Image (cartoon, rainbow, N blue to C red):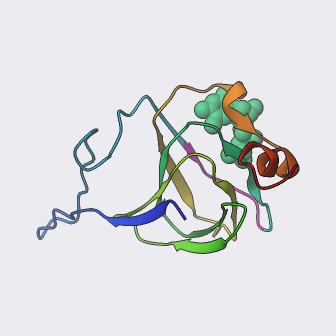
Amino acid sequence: MNYKIIRFQEHGDPRGQLVALEENKEIPFKIKRVYFMYDTLKDVVRGHHAHKSLEQILFCVHGSCKIHLDDGTETAEVMLDKPYEGLYIANNLWREMYDFSEDAVLLVLASELYDESDYIRDYDDFLKFIGKKK
Ligand code: TYD
């Protein structure tokens, strides 16, 4: 499945920690959009979609949450709970975000501007789009 957890370099010193992210260096695409989610209510599941071409890297910069990924054949569950770990998600992967801690801040770097026509919001349509269902 086309995802990976990337451990980014922490620039730590006695004052604390810092992580720097630069497009086409630490981040394998041009960053066109950044968004973040916070104050997510307990038991909420977000996402429920795939993207036709968008690539993203998700960071839980505070707190924790889990990500469910599905490529139509396999599934994976990833826990994000370290601010220096990013989850790269390629296009054509169904994703759901859940188990947000009360203090969770989920930061997303995206390779494209917001475009509703890039979303596949129905799971059966997703399976058809990737050729796993007729
Ligand atoms: P939504 O797609 O429901 O979030 P998720 O699937 O990740 O849970 O987005 C929530 C709202 O925010 C929706 O009205 C669209 C809007 N939105 C933007 O305007 N720009 C963006 O970059 C994103 C990700 C969402």
Q: Quadrant of the N terminus?
A: bottom right
- Main SS category, magenta section: loop
Locate residue 74 relative to residue 83 in the image: left or right.
right
Residue 114 occupies which quadrant of the picture?
A: top right
Which residue is at a point 62% across and 74% down the rendered structure image? 77
Number of numbered labels in the structure image? 0
Which residue is at a point 43% across and 64% down the rendered structure image? 4
Which one is nearer the viewer's eye here, 1 or 97?
Answer: 1
Residue 63: image x %, image y %?
A: 52, 68
Residue 24: image x %, image y %?
A: 26, 40
Residue 110: image x %, image y %?
A: 48, 38
Is residue 14 shown above or below 105?
below
Q: Residue furthest left?
A: 13
Which one is nearer the viewer's eye here, 37 or 22?
Answer: 22
Which residue is at a point 49% across and 49% down the rendered structure image? 107
Say whether residue 38 is magenta. Answer: yes
Q: Which residues are magenta?
A: 36-42
Say whether residue 27 is magenta. Answer: no
Which residue is at a point 60% across and 68% down the rendered structure image? 65
Locate residue 23 relative to residue 117 in the image: left or right.
left
Locate residue 127 relative to residue 23 in the image: left or right.
right
Give the quadrant of ligand 1.
top right
Is residue 24 shown above or below 97?
above
Residue 10: image x %, image y %?
A: 21, 65
